[in-house]
Each structure stands twice: as structure tokens, then as C-alpha cells.
């Protein structure tokens, strides 16, 4: 498939275009946070605590008088970094495991399947909580916890793809040309199996951001003063009646980001014709 | 000395034995047709020679296969791998699906010579393009960079043939190379393949169900029926004087000029499945000339004229 035309198809749909623009803004905000944030994320001013949105503080201030907009912009860094890093780790490991299991089969495949099915029976949040309980709270353990929580999904998906592709004639033809396992796996199976996995990864990134926010809300994620949308909401609960913006704006940030990611993922599925391909198979 | 000699191999898949003591040989540079209806074991024979049976959960349960200086039934997988594509190549049934859809066709040809001849990217590419030109692919340099979906079926089959030829193998096994193609292209592809094989002195095992193709291309024929060899002979002899009733019926299935409408005869009935092979000669339920003995006793392959045949009737008349 021509990659450029798939991207163009994606951007031509309203859904794809809008979500791409929103995601673009969020990513730029995260990357350039120190430059575009009006204030530092950790600058306290207790005299200005719990201020409502104003010209000086567009989204108001929190209970320590920190500028909410600046904290949300910096928080985007945490959310995106955790979401993207953990899903990338999860995808790479899941693909390796799934591809090996699907291709070689046998005892290894059975072992992987058992573990994957077992972990599949726990909700991701529970798995993540167990892991953080072991590793201790913090940004690094959040990433590890989320990677492990989503590992099963990617392993399953890749394994199923590889198993289906394995019996394709061109794989047999490649083997008949004298190719070894590595060649078949990396040059033919994975390139053909990767598209649905990437889309699943895109959609899982949205979930991972929610999971990161949830862990942050419980105080298990990024530790203060590092801004994290979940932790910000958590501290906002105490002020919910006197300063509701403290909880509303980070919540909105999470919602907008996740919706944009999901819409983008959805548009990507259509643009890559995955549904059509799944139907045909 | 024969390049490939298949001696009484049986193939089993689980408890089934779809191939029963198949034997034939191919000399260097010879073009041998392997014919039979669907389900007669042609493709399994090809897979057995290529050592690909494990892919479908099968194995060679008896007999031996000699290729050049190798005994293939006991060859390690690593040494087999070095043989495949380099000295014996397979052209599989359907060109539409035998190319990887996400990789450029040229790269897929390049791969073979990079893998087997140790060529670098640039040399491999030059070799591929030259090969493609020899196979009369127009604008080979451009086609080299195309993806399979951009090419027609006939063009894809030429790419597959180029992959098979590029490492200069001694034997090519072509498994119904034209079945999936338009009738108009079929003859062309067969012609190109046989031309190339003759020019390079490559032996060709041409699997087909079409006696017409055999007549056009081959030196010798092996007729398979329900997992056994029915008859073997040179093309001239088999068309002049088919000994086995099944061979006769197959030849009767070739449309000829001046045939009245409805005059083309099929063979009544179907090839029996591997689960319910009949006793005795496996063709006897469909045979118009079957005698009592055919239902009880398995006919053995016996020399008859220049060829061999497995039929009780041939024995009686001989």
C-alpha cells in the first residue's frame, strides 16, 4: 500500500483532519512547554491561591497559587511521554513475543499463550497497581507497569497475525527459496503483520494516558512537583466547591487528548482499510 | 546419471498416506511432466522433494530421494536450506499469492541472489534486471521497483520465474505454474519457461493437469492417480500409445479442432479422497475396462515398451 496516499486519505476526512490538528497542538505544547508556558510549573504564590481564570492566569491557579495553564502544558509532557514510551516498549516486546510464539509454535507458544491469557483476565489497572505495589510509586515504575499491562494485547494480536500469515503462499515460497527463520520472520512476516499492531498501539496510547492519569490520581505516578494531569485532578478534589477549575481543566485536557487519539486511530483504521482487509480475510 | 531420482517414496500426514511409493527420475536438463487430476498427489510430490512437508505437518515415511550428490530424506534442515533456491527452485501454484504484497518485486528477486550467491545489493539488482529482461518483462528497471499489486498475473508469474532462475538452479519444480492465469497467457508462460530451461540446461519438473501442456513442453511424462504412479513414458510414446486407461482418458480430455459441440469427454466420477481409497487399483471404480482382478490386487509398475505402467490389463495384453 502506498503510505502517502493513506496519510492523505486520513487527512481528507473531517475526523482525521481535526484529530490530527488537535494532536499536533498538544504535541507541540508538550515539546515546547518551557518556551510557551507563561509561568514555571513549580512557582508557588500562596497569595494567589485558588484564583479563578483571569487575564493573568487564563485557567486560574491551584491551591498553591501555581498557574494552571502552565502546569497543564507541562503535564502534557508527562502524559505523552508516559503514554508513548510505555506503549512503544509494550508494542516492541509484544511483537517479539507474539511473532516468536506464532511462528515457532510448540511449547514456547503454549507457555506464552497461557501467560497472556492469564494476564488478559485482569483489568489493566489492576495489573498496573500490582506492579507499582512491587516497584514503588514514581514515573519509571508507572511506565513499566503500563508496558506490562498492555503487553498481552500486543502479543495476542501479533501472534494471531503471524499465525494467519504463516500459511500464505508467499511465505512458503520464501522458504522454498532457501530463506531461514530470521529472514522469513523479519523481512516478510513482521512487515505484513505490523499495520494492525500499529493501529492498536495508537488506540492503546489513549488508554495508557488514562491509566497514567488514574495512577497519578492515586498518587502512584509522577511525584510532586512534577505536574501530571491525574495528580492535578486529585489535588483539585479538595477544592472542588471553592475552585472547581483546578479539577475541570486537567480533566478536560485528558478528555481532549484521549478523544483526539482515539479519533485519529479510528481514522487511521479507515485510511489503511484495515476493517475491509479484516472482512476479506 | 539422473539428477533427481525419487525411489518409492511414501508421504504420510498424521495417519493418512496420501502418496504411496512414488518413483520417477529426472535427468539433467530434461523436462518431465507430472500429470494427474486434483488430489492425485502432484503438489505433495513437489513438497516432498523440496523438503517442505513439515510446513503442512507431513513427512516422508518411506523410500529415498536422491538429488545430485545428496540424499534428501536424511539431509539436515540447514543444508537443505542452502539447496533450496540455489540448486533446486520451486515455482508455486499461484503467482497472485506467491509474492510478498508489501515488498517490491525486484527486491524479492534480489534477495535470492543475495542469499545464495553472496552478491551485494547493486550486483543483485543488476542481475535481477537482466533476468527480468531475459524473461521479456518490458521496462524491467521500472517493474523492478513495483509492488505485486501493480502487476498483472502474467507479469507476476514471470517475476516468480525470475526468482526461481536467478540463482542458476539445476532443477526447477513448477507446480501448475499457469493454472491461475488467463488461457491467453498460459501458453506464453509455458513457452518462456521451457525456452529458458532448454537454454540454460535446467531440468524442469512441470506439474500440471493439462495433457495439452505436456504435449507442448515435455520430454517425458509421469501420470499420477490417487497417490500412485499410473504410467510413465516419453511424451511421443504416451500420446501414440497410452497403456493405462487413465492416461487414455486424460488424453481424451484435450480439446481438439473440429470437435462437435458437447463432444469433449470428461472422466466420469471423482478422484477418491485419501480417506476412502478403493482396494486394488485405485482407478478401477472409474475405469471402463476394469476386470475382477482390478478390485483385489494392486497393479505393480512394470516395464512396457519404452515406459512403465501399473495396470493389470497392460500386463495381460503384453
Image (cartoon, coloured by chain):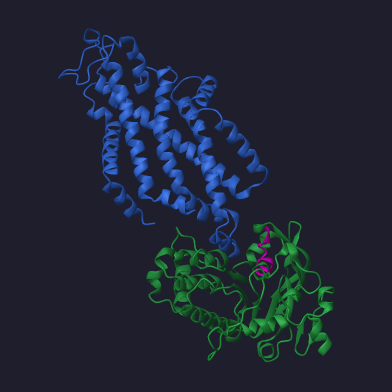
Q: Is residue B268 left or right of residue A35?
A: right
Look at the image and tell me in which quarter the N terminus of chain A lies: bottom left
The chain shown in blue is which? A
Residue furthest left in the image? A55
Q: Taking the image as drawn, is residue B172 in sight?
A: yes
Q: Is residue A1 left or right of residue A150?
A: left
Please give the range of residues in magenta.
Answer: B45-54
User: Magenta span: helix, strand or loop, mainly?
Assistant: helix
The magenta stretch spans residue B60: no
> In this structure image, what is the colour of chain B?
green
Quadrant of the rendered structure where residue B58 is?
bottom right
Q: Position of residue A230 (x, y in %)?
A: 37, 21
Quadrant of the rendered structure where residue B81 is?
bottom right
- Which residue is pictured at 28% across the width and 10% down the height? A241
Q: Position of residue B196 (x, y in %)?
A: 54, 81
- Which residue is pictured at 69% across the width and 78% down the height? B223
Q: Taking the image as drawn, is residue A225 in sight?
A: no
The magenta stretch spans residue B50: yes
In the image, residue B270 sits, relative to residue A17, either above or below, namely: below
Residue in front for this viewpoint, A37 or A274: A274
Q: Position of residue B299 (x, y in %)?
A: 81, 77
Q: Position of residue A13 (x, y in %)?
A: 28, 46
In the image, residue A122 sits, relative to residue B307, either above or below, namely: above
Amino acid at each position: 500500500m502506498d503510505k502517502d496516499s493513506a496519510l492523505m486519505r486520513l487527512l481528507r476526512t473531517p475526523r482525521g483532519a481535526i484529530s490530527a490538528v488537535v494532536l499536533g497542538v498538544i504535541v507541540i505544547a508538550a515539546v515546547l512547554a518551557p518556551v510557551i508556558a507563561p509561568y514555571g510549573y513549580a512557582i508557588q504564590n500562596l497569595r494567589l491561591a485558588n484564583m479563578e481564570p483571569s487575564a493573568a492566569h487564563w485557567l486560574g491557579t491551584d491551591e498553591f497559587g501555581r498557574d494552571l495553564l502552565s502546569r497543564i502544558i507541562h503535564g502534557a509532557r508527562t502524559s505523552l511521554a508516559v503514554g508513548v514510551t510505555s506503549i512503544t516498549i509494550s508494542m516492541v516486546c509484544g511483537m517479539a513475543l507474539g511473532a516468536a510464539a506464532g511462528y515457532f509454535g510448540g511449547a514456547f507458544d503454549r507457555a506464552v499463550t497461557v501467560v497472556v491469557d492469564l494476564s488478559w483476565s485482569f483489568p489493566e489497572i489492576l495489573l498496573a497497581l500490582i506492579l507499582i505495589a512491587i516497584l514503588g510509586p514514581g514515573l519509571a515504575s508507572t511506565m513499566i507497569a503500563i508496558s506490562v499491562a498492555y503487553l498481552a494485547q500486543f502479543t495476542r494480536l501479533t501472534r494471531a497475525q503471524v499465525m494467519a500469515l504463516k500459511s500464505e503462499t508467499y511465505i512458503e515460497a520464501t522458504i522454498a527459496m532457501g530463506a531461514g527463520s530470521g529472514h522469513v520472520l523479519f523481512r516478510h512476516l513482521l512487515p505484513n503483520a505490523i499495520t494492525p499492531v500499529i493501529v492498536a498501539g495508537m488506540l492503546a496510547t489513549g488508554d495508557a494516558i488514562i491509566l497514567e492519569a488514574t495512577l497519578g490520581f492515586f498518587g502512584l505516578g509522577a511525584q510532586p512537583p512534577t505536574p501530571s494531569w491525574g495528580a492535578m485532578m486529585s489535588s483539585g478534589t479538595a477544592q472542588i466547591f471553592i475552585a472547581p477549575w483546578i479539577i475541570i481543566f486537567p480533566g478536560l485536557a485528558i478528555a481532549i487528548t484521549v478523544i483526539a487519539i482515539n479519533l485519529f486511530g479510528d481514522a487511521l483504521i479507515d485510511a489503511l482499510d484495515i476493517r475491509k482487509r479484516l472482512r476479506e480475510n | 546419471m539422473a539428477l533427481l531420482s525419487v525411489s518409492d517414496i511414501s508421504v504420510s500426514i498424521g495417519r493418512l498416506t496420501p502418496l504411496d511409493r512414488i518413483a520417477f527420475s529426472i535427468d539433467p536438463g530434461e523436462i518431465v511432466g507430472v500429470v494427474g487430476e486434483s488430489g492425485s498427489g502432484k503438489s505433495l510430490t513437489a513438497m516432498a522433494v523440496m523438503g517442505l512437508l513439515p510446513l503442512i505437518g507431513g513427512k516422508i515415511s518411506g523410500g529415498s530421494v536422491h538429488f545430485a550428490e545428496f540424499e534428501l530424506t536424511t539431509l539436515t534442515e540447514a543444508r537443505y536450506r542452502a539447496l533450496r533456491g540455489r540448486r533446486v527452485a520451486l515455482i508455486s501454484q499461484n503467482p497472485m499469492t506467491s509474492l510478498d504484497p508489501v515488498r517490491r518485486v525486484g527486491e524479492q528477486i534480489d534477495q535470492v541472489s543475495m542469499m545464495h550467491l553472496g552478491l551485494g545489493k547493486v550486483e543483485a539488482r543488476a542481475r535481477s534486471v537482466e533476468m527480468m529482461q531475459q524473461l521479456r518483462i518490458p521496462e524491467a528497471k521500472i517493474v523492478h521497483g513495483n509492488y505485486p499489486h501493480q502487476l498483472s498475473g502474467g507479469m507476476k508469474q514471470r517475476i516468480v520465474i525470475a526468482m526461481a532462475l536467478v540463482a542458476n538452479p539445476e532443477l526447477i519444480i513448477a507446480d501448475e505454474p499457469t493454472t491461475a492465469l488467463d488461457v491467453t497467457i498460459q501458453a506464453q508462460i509455458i513457452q518462456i519457461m521451457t525456452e529458458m530451461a532448454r537454454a540454460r540446461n535446467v531440468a524442469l519438473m512441470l506439474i500440471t493437469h493439462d495433457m495439452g501442456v505436456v504435449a507442448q513442453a515435455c520430454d517425458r511424462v509421469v501420470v499420477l492417480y490417487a497417490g500412485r504412479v499410473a504410467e510413465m513414458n516419453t511424451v511421443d510414446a504416451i500420446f501414440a500409445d497410452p497403456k493405462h486407461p487413465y492416461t487414455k482418458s486424460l488424453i481424451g480430455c484435450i480439446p481438439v479442432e473440429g470437435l462437435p459441440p458437447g463432444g469433449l469427454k470428461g472422466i466420469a466420477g471423482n478422484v477418491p479422497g485419501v480417506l476412502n481409497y478403493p482396494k486394488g487399483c485405485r482407478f478401477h471404480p472409474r475405469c471402463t475396462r476394469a476386470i475382477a482382478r482390478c478390485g483385489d490386487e494392486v497393479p505393480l509398475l512394470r516395464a512396457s515398451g519404452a515406459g512403465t505402467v501399473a495396470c493389470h490389463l497392460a500386463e495381460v495384453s503384453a
